[in-house]
Amino acid sequence: MASSRKVGAAAITMVPASIATYLSTLPNGVASYPECSVKASVLRHNVASKGFGPEIELPPAVRKLVDSPPPVTEWIPEVHFNVAMLAIHEVHFGGRSVDEYRAWVYAQNRKLLAAPLYRVLFAVLSPERLLRGIEKRWGAFRRGTEFSVVVEAPGRAELRIRSPAFHYPAPMTLGMSMALQAGLDSAGARNSLVEVVSHSSTECVFSARWQA
């Protein structure tokens, strides 16, 4: 959880512990991996739902993004986005059931994928057709990381994300499992389930199952 210190009569919340830990694993802290980016629409969508005030201390570049998100079509550094998401995870879901966080991420992604900006990518599809074009759809949201289908069979698939070292902390990969599940459901899947199978410093593997 975030710690705090007192200055005079005021309490200032320090950098949440998960953010400090995450940044310490990266080669250049918050400035690491500028080649990895994410659409600003994803940040705006999540911060609008679960925002936080100036009492949460963030790196200046991330604070600027949170306070004044750029237009939805712009690209922002993904490390900055990850830091903002870690703050949301710790402030709003820290100490609670993981199921609450999973449910929130799933609901957020269903709403985002139904928005006009992305609806065309997922409309009138089957889960199988979605997976066959998954690299293109991944590229609509993220750059600098690699998404691939490792195994595909009727009603199931194994999916893999590759990234620079320690780019994705555990809460992010958990959230991605729910984003992938939301994508499958947006493409017509029923009773879907996406789970993290393994997570190393540079690779995360997911197991996906569904009914057509």
Image: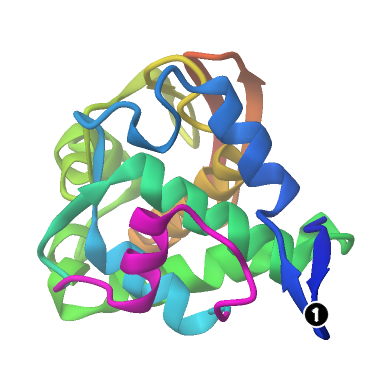
Question: Which of the image's four quarters has the N terminus?
Answer: bottom right
Q: Is residue 196 left or right of residue 165?
A: right
Residue at 87% from the left image edge and 64% from the top image edge: 96
Q: Give the range drawn in magenta.
A: 53-71
The amino acid sitting under disc 1 is Gly
Which of 33/105 is in front?
Answer: 33
Residue 27 versus residue 170 in the image, above or below:
above
Residue drawn at 18 percent across, 37 percent down = 133
* SS assignment at label 1: loop
- The x, y position of residue 118, in whole percent, is 18, 66
Place residue 73 in its image quadrant.
Answer: bottom left
Instruction: Tell me the residue at 52%/21% (across/down).
Output: 166
Is residue 90 found inside the magenta-colored segment of the image?
A: no
Left or right, 79 with reference to 197 = left
Tally the marks.
Answer: 1
Q: Is residue 87 above or below residue 72?
A: above
Q: Where is residue 129 in the image (x, y as percent from the top left)?
A: 23, 42
Residue 20 in the image, given as x and y percentages of width and height: 64, 40
- The residue sitting at 83% across, 85% down in the picture is 9
| Left or right position of 109 against 118 | right
Reply yes or no: does residue 61 show up in magenta.
yes
The residue at which mark 1 appears reads as 8
Work out whether residue 148 or residue 169 is closer to the camera in this orientation and state it: 169
